[in-house]
């Protein structure tokens, strides 16, 4: 369950930042880059802050 929530969060943040970059300001692409870098970092280190937060909130695997 946590993996689905994490993937949904990442997808929503990427799509939202792309829309903001298109309609508001191109600097919102930095949010897209941050989300991508965070996904890459978590694939290497096997640590994800959102996963820790979801665990503390009681979300099961």
Image (spheres, rainbow, N blue to C red):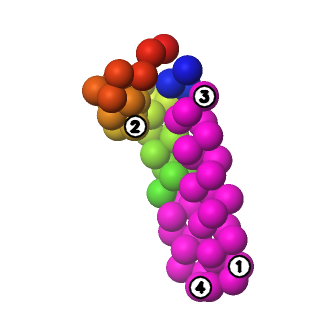
- Tags 3 and 2 touching, CB below 8 Å: no
Residue 24 quadrant = bottom right
Q: Which mark is residue 22?
A: 1
Picture layout, residue 19 above or below residue 35: below
Tell me the residue that label 3 is attached to: 4
Q: Position of residue 15 (x, y in %)?
A: 68, 59
Asked if 38 appears above or below 17 in the picture, the reply is above
Measured Cα–Cα span from mark 4 to mark 2: 27 Å
The answer to which of marks 1 and 2 sits earlier in the sequence is: 1
* Cα distance between the residues tagged 3 and 1: 27 Å
Above or below — where is 57 with respect to 29? Answer: above
Q: Residue at x 55, y 74 (%)?
A: 28
Task: Please give left or right for residue 23 compared with residue 43 in the image.
Answer: right
User: Which callout, 3 or 4, points to the residue nearer the camera?
Assistant: 3
Magenta range is: 4-33
Q: Main secondary structure of the magenta part?
A: helix
Disc 4 secondary structure class: loop
Sort mark 2 into few (<14), some (14-19) or many (20+) by Cα contacts within 10 Å.
some
Query: Which residue is under mark 4?
Result: 25
* 55 horizontally vs 36: left or right: left
């Amino acid at each position: 369950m946590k993996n689905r929530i994490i993937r949904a969060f990442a997808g929503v943040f990427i799509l939202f930042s792309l829309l903001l970059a298109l309609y508001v300001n191109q600097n919102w692409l930095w949010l897209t880059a941050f989300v991508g870098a965070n996904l890459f970092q978590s694939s290497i280190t096997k640590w994800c802050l959102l996963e820790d937060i979801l665990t503390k909130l009681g979300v099961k695997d």
